[in-house]
Amino acid sequence: MTCDEVRGRLELFVDSEMPADELEEFNAHLRGCSACAANALGLLQTKLATRAAGVRYAPSPEFRRRMEQSLRARSKPSWLHLRFPRFAVAAAAAVLLIACATVWVHHSAREDKLTEIADLHVTDLASTNPVDVVSTDRHTVKPWFAGKLPFSFNLPELQNSPFTLVGGRVTYFQRSPGADLLFDVRKHQLSVFIFKEEPGEFSAHFGTATATRLALHIETWSDAGLRYYIVSDAPASDVHALGDLLRDAARS
Amino acid sequence: MPLLARLYNFAHWLTQDRGEAEDLVQEACMKALKGFSSFHQGTNFRAWIYRILRNTFLTSRAGLRVATLSFDDEEDPPAEPVASGTPESILISSLDQQSIQAALEALPVRYREVILLCDVEEMKYQEIAETLSIPVGTVMSRLARGRKAMRELLNAASIRGASGSGHK
Protein backbone atom coordinates (compact mmCIF):
# COMPACT_ATOMS: atom_id res chain seq x y z
CA MET A 1 0.00 0.00 0.00
CA THR A 2 1.51 3.34 -1.05
CA CYS A 3 1.31 6.68 0.78
CA ASP A 4 -1.03 8.02 -1.94
CA GLU A 5 -3.37 5.05 -1.50
CA VAL A 6 -3.31 5.52 2.28
CA ARG A 7 -4.04 9.25 2.03
CA GLY A 8 -7.04 8.49 -0.16
CA ARG A 9 -8.50 6.17 2.48
CA LEU A 10 -7.65 7.97 5.72
CA GLU A 11 -11.21 9.20 6.16
CA LEU A 12 -12.52 5.63 6.00
CA PHE A 13 -9.98 4.69 8.65
CA VAL A 14 -10.83 7.43 11.17
CA ASP A 15 -14.57 6.93 10.60
CA SER A 16 -14.24 3.18 11.33
CA GLU A 17 -15.61 2.42 7.88
CA MET A 18 -12.59 0.58 6.50
CA PRO A 19 -13.28 -3.02 5.43
CA ALA A 20 -11.70 -5.50 7.84
CA ASP A 21 -9.62 -7.13 5.10
CA GLU A 22 -7.85 -3.81 4.38
CA LEU A 23 -7.31 -2.81 7.97
CA GLU A 24 -4.29 -4.97 8.68
CA GLU A 25 -2.36 -3.73 5.64
CA PHE A 26 -3.39 -0.16 6.42
CA ASN A 27 -2.22 -0.41 10.04
CA ALA A 28 1.06 -1.95 8.90
CA HIS A 29 1.68 1.04 6.64
CA LEU A 30 0.91 3.50 9.45
CA ARG A 31 3.33 1.72 11.76
CA GLY A 32 6.11 2.18 9.24
CA CYS A 33 5.31 5.65 7.85
CA SER A 34 5.48 8.59 10.24
CA ALA A 35 4.00 11.06 7.70
CA CYS A 36 0.85 8.99 7.13
CA ALA A 37 0.61 8.21 10.86
CA ALA A 38 0.75 11.97 11.61
CA ASN A 39 -2.00 12.62 9.06
CA ALA A 40 -4.18 9.86 10.53
CA LEU A 41 -3.62 11.21 14.04
CA GLY A 42 -4.42 14.73 12.86
CA LEU A 43 -7.68 13.64 11.26
CA LEU A 44 -8.64 11.66 14.33
CA GLN A 45 -7.90 14.61 16.62
CA THR A 46 -9.99 16.88 14.39
CA LYS A 47 -12.84 14.38 14.56
CA LEU A 48 -12.66 14.13 18.35
CA ALA A 49 -12.38 17.92 18.72
CA THR A 50 -15.39 18.34 16.42
CA ARG A 51 -17.36 15.80 18.44
CA ALA A 52 -16.71 17.79 21.62
CA ALA A 53 -17.34 21.19 20.03
CA GLY A 54 -20.42 19.98 18.17
CA VAL A 55 -22.43 19.25 21.30
CA ARG A 56 -23.11 22.93 21.79
CA TYR A 57 -26.81 23.66 22.11
CA ALA A 58 -29.20 22.29 24.73
CA PRO A 59 -32.99 22.59 24.72
CA SER A 60 -34.31 24.83 27.46
CA PRO A 61 -36.41 23.27 30.26
CA GLU A 62 -39.28 25.45 29.07
CA PHE A 63 -39.03 23.99 25.56
CA ARG A 64 -38.87 20.45 26.93
CA ARG A 65 -42.07 21.09 28.88
CA ARG A 66 -43.74 22.59 25.82
CA MET A 67 -42.77 19.56 23.74
CA GLU A 68 -44.07 17.18 26.34
CA GLN A 69 -47.39 19.03 26.51
CA SER A 70 -47.68 19.00 22.71
CA LEU A 71 -46.94 15.29 22.53
CA ARG A 72 -49.38 14.47 25.31
CA ALA A 73 -52.10 16.60 23.74
CA ARG A 74 -51.44 14.82 20.50
CA SER A 75 -51.84 11.44 22.15
CA LYS A 76 -55.44 12.08 23.29
CA PRO A 77 -57.87 9.92 21.29
CA SER A 78 -60.61 11.56 19.28
CA TRP A 79 -64.00 10.31 18.08
CA LEU A 80 -62.68 10.51 14.57
CA HIS A 81 -60.43 7.57 15.29
CA LEU A 82 -63.35 5.48 16.42
CA ARG A 83 -65.14 6.15 13.17
CA PHE A 84 -62.08 5.22 11.13
CA PRO A 85 -60.45 2.11 12.60
CA ARG A 86 -57.48 2.37 10.22
CA PHE A 87 -56.63 5.76 11.62
CA ALA A 88 -57.30 4.44 15.08
CA VAL A 89 -54.59 1.82 14.57
CA ALA A 90 -52.16 4.55 13.50
CA ALA A 91 -53.24 6.64 16.47
CA ALA A 92 -52.73 3.67 18.77
CA ALA A 93 -49.25 3.25 17.34
CA ALA A 94 -48.61 6.94 17.97
CA VAL A 95 -49.94 6.65 21.50
CA LEU A 96 -47.74 3.61 22.02
CA LEU A 97 -44.76 5.57 20.74
CA ILE A 98 -45.56 8.38 23.11
CA ALA A 99 -46.13 5.96 25.96
CA CYS A 100 -42.70 4.50 25.31
CA ALA A 101 -41.01 7.76 24.47
CA THR A 102 -42.53 9.97 27.11
CA VAL A 103 -43.22 7.50 29.87
CA TRP A 104 -41.36 9.84 32.12
CA VAL A 105 -42.78 13.22 32.94
CA HIS A 106 -40.08 15.78 33.48
CA HIS A 107 -41.70 18.70 35.18
CA SER A 108 -38.52 19.69 36.92
CA ALA A 109 -34.85 20.20 36.30
CA ARG A 110 -34.21 16.86 38.01
CA GLU A 111 -36.40 15.07 35.50
CA ASP A 112 -34.78 16.92 32.58
CA LYS A 113 -31.36 15.86 33.72
CA LEU A 114 -32.33 12.20 34.16
CA THR A 115 -33.82 12.24 30.68
CA GLU A 116 -30.64 13.67 29.22
CA ILE A 117 -28.60 11.03 31.02
CA ALA A 118 -30.83 8.33 29.53
CA ASP A 119 -30.30 9.98 26.13
CA LEU A 120 -26.54 9.75 26.62
CA HIS A 121 -26.83 6.00 27.25
CA VAL A 122 -29.07 5.47 24.21
CA THR A 123 -26.64 7.50 22.09
CA ASP A 124 -23.77 5.37 23.41
CA LEU A 125 -25.48 2.18 22.32
CA ALA A 126 -26.30 3.63 18.89
CA SER A 127 -22.75 4.88 18.44
CA THR A 128 -20.32 3.21 16.09
CA ASN A 129 -17.56 4.03 18.58
CA PRO A 130 -19.12 3.69 22.03
CA VAL A 131 -15.70 3.81 23.67
CA ASP A 132 -12.43 5.52 22.78
CA VAL A 133 -10.28 3.44 25.11
CA VAL A 134 -11.04 -0.23 24.71
CA SER A 135 -9.87 -2.32 27.65
CA THR A 136 -11.18 -4.62 30.34
CA ASP A 137 -8.33 -3.49 32.58
CA ARG A 138 -9.20 -0.68 34.99
CA HIS A 139 -5.50 0.15 35.21
CA THR A 140 -5.60 0.99 31.50
CA VAL A 141 -8.94 2.78 31.42
CA LYS A 142 -8.55 5.02 34.46
CA PRO A 143 -5.15 6.51 33.45
CA TRP A 144 -6.53 7.19 29.96
CA PHE A 145 -8.75 9.91 31.46
CA ALA A 146 -5.81 11.67 33.14
CA GLY A 147 -5.51 15.17 31.71
CA LYS A 148 -8.83 14.86 29.89
CA LEU A 149 -11.07 15.51 32.93
CA PRO A 150 -10.81 18.05 35.74
CA PHE A 151 -11.11 15.25 38.34
CA SER A 152 -10.05 11.69 39.04
CA PHE A 153 -12.06 8.64 40.12
CA ASN A 154 -11.55 5.03 41.15
CA LEU A 155 -12.75 1.96 39.30
CA PRO A 156 -13.65 -1.27 41.10
CA GLU A 157 -11.95 -4.64 40.86
CA LEU A 158 -14.38 -6.80 38.85
CA GLN A 159 -12.64 -10.15 38.95
CA ASN A 160 -15.18 -11.84 41.24
CA SER A 161 -18.21 -10.06 39.88
CA PRO A 162 -20.47 -10.73 36.86
CA PHE A 163 -19.47 -7.35 35.35
CA THR A 164 -16.92 -6.71 32.62
CA LEU A 165 -15.40 -3.35 31.85
CA VAL A 166 -15.61 -2.62 28.09
CA GLY A 167 -13.89 0.76 28.00
CA GLY A 168 -14.58 4.45 28.23
CA ARG A 169 -14.56 7.83 26.64
CA VAL A 170 -15.03 11.49 27.50
CA THR A 171 -18.60 12.75 27.25
CA TYR A 172 -20.30 16.09 27.81
CA PHE A 173 -23.37 16.78 29.92
CA GLN A 174 -24.66 20.32 30.08
CA ARG A 175 -21.30 21.43 28.68
CA SER A 176 -19.28 19.80 31.45
CA PRO A 177 -16.83 17.03 30.59
CA GLY A 178 -17.22 13.70 32.32
CA ALA A 179 -16.25 10.03 32.18
CA ASP A 180 -18.48 7.70 30.16
CA LEU A 181 -17.69 4.09 31.06
CA LEU A 182 -19.26 1.03 29.51
CA PHE A 183 -19.75 -2.26 31.36
CA ASP A 184 -21.28 -5.60 30.32
CA VAL A 185 -23.34 -7.98 32.42
CA ARG A 186 -25.03 -11.02 30.87
CA LYS A 187 -25.29 -9.39 27.43
CA HIS A 188 -26.73 -6.17 28.91
CA GLN A 189 -24.72 -2.98 28.69
CA LEU A 190 -24.45 -0.48 31.50
CA SER A 191 -23.27 3.09 31.06
CA VAL A 192 -21.64 4.76 34.02
CA PHE A 193 -21.32 8.54 33.84
CA ILE A 194 -19.20 10.49 36.30
CA PHE A 195 -19.25 14.29 36.43
CA LYS A 196 -17.92 16.91 38.75
CA GLU A 197 -20.88 17.98 40.85
CA GLU A 198 -21.84 21.60 40.59
CA PRO A 199 -22.13 22.97 44.14
CA GLY A 200 -25.72 23.20 45.27
CA GLU A 201 -27.26 22.36 41.92
CA PHE A 202 -27.34 18.61 41.50
CA SER A 203 -27.34 17.82 45.17
CA ALA A 204 -30.41 20.00 45.67
CA HIS A 205 -32.27 18.13 42.95
CA PHE A 206 -30.97 14.59 43.33
CA GLY A 207 -29.32 13.27 46.42
CA THR A 208 -29.37 9.52 45.90
CA ALA A 209 -32.07 8.33 43.58
CA THR A 210 -33.25 5.52 41.39
CA ALA A 211 -35.57 5.96 38.46
CA THR A 212 -36.88 4.20 35.38
CA ARG A 213 -36.94 5.80 31.95
CA LEU A 214 -38.11 3.93 28.87
CA ALA A 215 -37.43 0.59 30.57
CA LEU A 216 -33.97 1.85 31.50
CA HIS A 217 -32.96 1.72 35.15
CA ILE A 218 -31.05 4.73 36.40
CA GLU A 219 -29.24 5.03 39.70
CA THR A 220 -27.51 8.22 40.78
CA TRP A 221 -25.61 9.31 43.84
CA SER A 222 -23.03 11.81 44.93
CA ASP A 223 -19.70 11.02 46.52
CA ALA A 224 -16.74 13.26 47.27
CA GLY A 225 -17.80 16.01 44.91
CA LEU A 226 -18.57 13.68 42.04
CA ARG A 227 -22.00 12.81 40.65
CA TYR A 228 -22.38 9.21 39.45
CA TYR A 229 -25.10 7.84 37.16
CA ILE A 230 -25.65 4.25 36.04
CA VAL A 231 -28.06 3.66 33.16
CA SER A 232 -28.98 0.25 31.76
CA ASP A 233 -31.72 -2.04 30.57
CA ALA A 234 -30.25 -4.68 32.90
CA PRO A 235 -32.32 -5.61 35.99
CA ALA A 236 -32.36 -2.96 38.71
CA SER A 237 -30.54 -5.39 41.01
CA ASP A 238 -27.57 -5.47 38.59
CA VAL A 239 -27.55 -1.68 38.35
CA HIS A 240 -27.52 -1.47 42.13
CA ALA A 241 -24.80 -4.12 42.44
CA LEU A 242 -22.52 -2.18 40.10
CA GLY A 243 -23.32 0.96 42.08
CA ASP A 244 -22.17 -0.80 45.27
CA LEU A 245 -18.90 -1.79 43.60
CA LEU A 246 -18.30 1.79 42.44
CA ARG A 247 -19.17 3.19 45.88
CA ASP A 248 -16.75 0.78 47.54
CA ALA A 249 -14.04 1.67 45.03
CA ALA A 250 -14.56 5.38 45.64
CA ARG A 251 -13.98 4.88 49.37
CA SER A 252 -10.87 2.74 48.91
CA MET B 1 -38.22 12.04 24.89
CA PRO B 2 -35.28 10.08 23.50
CA LEU B 3 -33.01 12.04 21.18
CA LEU B 4 -34.69 15.39 21.96
CA ALA B 5 -31.43 16.97 23.09
CA ARG B 6 -29.57 15.55 20.08
CA LEU B 7 -32.27 16.59 17.62
CA TYR B 8 -32.34 20.06 19.14
CA ASN B 9 -28.55 20.41 18.93
CA PHE B 10 -28.61 19.37 15.26
CA ALA B 11 -31.55 21.69 14.53
CA HIS B 12 -29.78 24.64 16.17
CA TRP B 13 -26.66 24.00 14.11
CA LEU B 14 -28.80 23.95 10.96
CA THR B 15 -30.86 27.05 11.70
CA GLN B 16 -28.35 29.02 13.80
CA ASP B 17 -31.29 30.36 15.81
CA ARG B 18 -32.84 29.14 19.06
CA GLY B 19 -36.44 30.00 18.19
CA GLU B 20 -36.24 28.50 14.71
CA ALA B 21 -34.54 25.39 16.11
CA GLU B 22 -37.36 24.91 18.62
CA ASP B 23 -40.00 25.36 15.90
CA LEU B 24 -38.14 22.92 13.69
CA VAL B 25 -37.87 20.20 16.34
CA GLN B 26 -41.50 20.63 17.34
CA GLU B 27 -42.75 20.44 13.77
CA ALA B 28 -40.54 17.45 12.98
CA CYS B 29 -41.75 15.55 16.05
CA MET B 30 -45.38 16.26 15.17
CA LYS B 31 -44.76 15.02 11.63
CA ALA B 32 -43.04 11.93 13.01
CA LEU B 33 -46.02 11.12 15.21
CA LYS B 34 -48.46 11.79 12.42
CA GLY B 35 -46.54 9.60 10.00
CA PHE B 36 -45.41 6.94 12.45
CA SER B 37 -47.22 4.31 10.42
CA SER B 38 -44.71 5.01 7.62
CA PHE B 39 -41.87 3.90 9.88
CA HIS B 40 -41.02 0.30 9.16
CA GLN B 41 -40.11 -1.74 12.22
CA GLY B 42 -36.61 -3.10 11.93
CA THR B 43 -35.36 -0.12 9.92
CA ASN B 44 -33.26 2.66 11.37
CA PHE B 45 -35.42 4.83 13.66
CA ARG B 46 -32.69 7.43 14.17
CA ALA B 47 -32.12 7.92 10.44
CA TRP B 48 -35.90 8.12 9.97
CA ILE B 49 -36.46 10.89 12.53
CA TYR B 50 -33.36 12.86 11.48
CA ARG B 51 -34.55 12.64 7.88
CA ILE B 52 -37.91 14.12 8.89
CA LEU B 53 -36.13 16.91 10.78
CA ARG B 54 -33.82 17.67 7.90
CA ASN B 55 -36.63 17.63 5.31
CA THR B 56 -38.65 19.92 7.55
CA PHE B 57 -35.67 22.24 7.73
CA LEU B 58 -35.37 22.38 3.94
CA THR B 59 -38.93 23.69 3.67
CA SER B 60 -38.66 26.06 6.65
CA ARG B 61 -37.86 29.78 6.47
CA ALA B 62 -34.31 29.07 7.64
CA GLY B 63 -33.96 26.27 5.10
CA LEU B 64 -35.27 28.37 2.26
CA ARG B 65 -32.71 31.05 3.14
CA VAL B 66 -29.90 28.60 2.44
CA ALA B 67 -31.70 27.04 -0.53
CA THR B 68 -29.56 29.12 -2.84
CA LEU B 69 -26.77 26.74 -1.87
CA SER B 70 -27.47 23.69 -3.96
CA PHE B 71 -27.88 20.41 -2.12
CA ASP B 72 -27.23 18.62 -5.39
CA ASP B 73 -23.71 17.23 -5.66
CA GLU B 74 -23.57 17.32 -9.43
CA GLU B 75 -21.01 20.08 -9.30
CA ASP B 76 -18.95 18.41 -6.57
CA PRO B 77 -15.52 17.49 -7.90
CA PRO B 78 -14.04 14.24 -6.63
CA ALA B 79 -12.87 14.37 -3.03
CA GLU B 80 -9.21 15.20 -2.63
CA PRO B 81 -7.09 13.09 -0.33
CA VAL B 82 -5.79 14.53 2.91
CA ALA B 83 -2.79 16.72 2.17
CA SER B 84 0.45 15.46 3.56
CA GLY B 85 2.88 17.69 5.39
CA THR B 86 0.19 19.45 7.42
CA PRO B 87 -0.07 17.66 10.71
CA GLU B 88 -3.46 18.75 11.97
CA SER B 89 -2.46 17.48 15.37
CA ILE B 90 -0.33 20.58 15.78
CA LEU B 91 -3.06 22.78 14.38
CA ILE B 92 -5.86 21.45 16.56
CA SER B 93 -3.88 21.62 19.75
CA SER B 94 -3.40 25.32 19.10
CA LEU B 95 -7.09 26.02 18.57
CA ASP B 96 -9.81 26.23 21.14
CA GLN B 97 -13.35 24.91 21.05
CA GLN B 98 -14.71 28.29 19.97
CA SER B 99 -12.54 28.25 16.85
CA ILE B 100 -13.85 24.83 15.88
CA GLN B 101 -17.42 25.96 16.47
CA ALA B 102 -16.81 29.11 14.42
CA ALA B 103 -15.39 26.99 11.58
CA LEU B 104 -18.42 24.68 11.70
CA GLU B 105 -20.75 27.69 11.60
CA ALA B 106 -18.92 29.10 8.61
CA LEU B 107 -19.26 25.89 6.58
CA PRO B 108 -21.99 25.66 3.94
CA VAL B 109 -24.96 23.74 5.38
CA ARG B 110 -24.46 20.69 3.19
CA TYR B 111 -20.95 20.18 4.57
CA ARG B 112 -21.89 21.19 8.12
CA GLU B 113 -24.75 18.69 8.32
CA VAL B 114 -22.73 15.74 7.05
CA ILE B 115 -19.86 16.48 9.46
CA LEU B 116 -22.30 16.83 12.36
CA LEU B 117 -24.01 13.55 11.51
CA CYS B 118 -20.70 11.71 11.17
CA ASP B 119 -18.55 13.24 13.92
CA VAL B 120 -21.10 14.42 16.49
CA GLU B 121 -23.98 11.97 15.99
CA GLU B 122 -21.50 9.22 15.09
CA MET B 123 -23.64 7.81 12.33
CA LYS B 124 -22.26 5.28 9.85
CA TYR B 125 -21.98 6.36 6.22
CA GLN B 126 -25.00 4.21 5.32
CA GLU B 127 -27.08 5.83 8.07
CA ILE B 128 -26.08 9.31 6.91
CA ALA B 129 -26.98 8.34 3.34
CA GLU B 130 -30.45 7.26 4.53
CA THR B 131 -30.88 10.45 6.57
CA LEU B 132 -29.90 12.78 3.74
CA SER B 133 -31.37 10.60 0.95
CA ILE B 134 -28.11 10.62 -0.97
CA PRO B 135 -25.77 7.83 -2.12
CA VAL B 136 -23.00 6.66 0.21
CA GLY B 137 -20.42 7.89 -2.31
CA THR B 138 -21.85 11.40 -2.01
CA VAL B 139 -21.66 11.17 1.77
CA MET B 140 -17.94 10.35 1.49
CA SER B 141 -17.36 13.12 -1.03
CA ARG B 142 -19.14 15.74 1.10
CA LEU B 143 -17.30 14.60 4.22
CA ALA B 144 -13.91 14.87 2.56
CA ARG B 145 -14.68 18.27 1.07
CA GLY B 146 -16.28 19.55 4.27
CA ARG B 147 -13.32 18.51 6.37
CA LYS B 148 -10.91 20.06 3.89
CA ALA B 149 -12.88 23.33 4.04
CA MET B 150 -12.85 23.12 7.83
CA ARG B 151 -9.07 22.62 7.92
CA GLU B 152 -8.66 25.69 5.72
CA LEU B 153 -10.91 27.75 8.00
CA LEU B 154 -9.01 26.58 11.08
CA ASN B 155 -5.68 27.30 9.39
CA ALA B 156 -6.83 30.81 8.52
CA ALA B 157 -8.03 31.36 12.10
CA SER B 158 -4.74 30.05 13.44
CA ILE B 159 -2.74 32.41 11.20
CA ARG B 160 -4.97 35.35 12.17
CA GLY B 161 -4.48 34.47 15.85
CA ALA B 162 -0.71 34.21 15.45
CA SER B 163 -0.40 37.51 13.57
CA GLY B 164 -2.77 39.16 16.09
CA SER B 165 -0.65 38.08 19.03
CA GLY B 166 2.50 39.05 17.10
CA HIS B 167 1.33 42.66 16.83
CA LYS B 168 0.84 43.00 20.54
Image: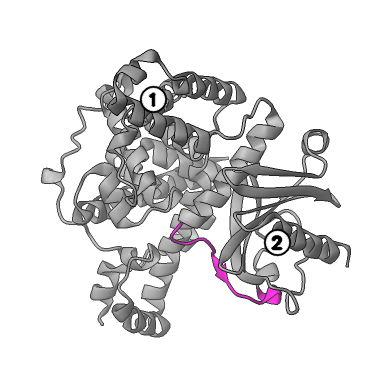
Rendered view: B131 above or below B20:
below
* For residue A29, above or below residue A59: below
Residue B1 seen in the figure = no
Residue for point 20% across, 27% down: B68
In the picture as drawn, the residue positioned furthest to the left comes out as B74
Residue at disc 2, secondary structure:
helix
Q: Name the image quarter holding the N terminus of chain A.
A: bottom left
Query: In the rendered structure, are the residues bearing label 1 and label 2 in contact, judged by CB atoms less than 8 Å apart?
Result: no
In magenta segment, residue B23: no
Q: Which residues are magenta?
A: A127-140
Q: Residues within 10 Å of mark 1 (few under 14, many from 20)?
A: some
Give the class, few, some or many, for how many residues have Cα within 10 Å of label 2's Cα (few <14, many ≥20). Answer: some
Measured as percent of width and height from the top left, residue A99 is found at: 51, 34
> Which residue matches tag 1?
B30
CA distance for labels 1 and 2: 37 Å
Q: Residue at x 59, y 21 (%)?
A: A62
- What mark, if any, has residue A238 been given in the picture? 2
Image spot of residue A48 (x, y percent):
49, 56
Q: Residue A63's x, y, as percent?
A: 54, 22
Q: Give the residue displayed 79% in from the left and 65% down from the top.
A: A245
Secondary-structure class at tag 1: helix
Name the subunit of mark 2.
A
Query: In the figure, residue A198 lies in which quadrant?
Result: top right
Inspect the image, locate mark 1, and give the three-letter code of the amino acid beneath it: Met
Q: Disc 1 is attached to a residue of which chain? A: B
Q: Quadrant of residue B153?
A: top left
Would you say the magenta stretch is mainly helix, strand or loop? loop
Could you tell me residue A222's position as x and y percent? 82, 48
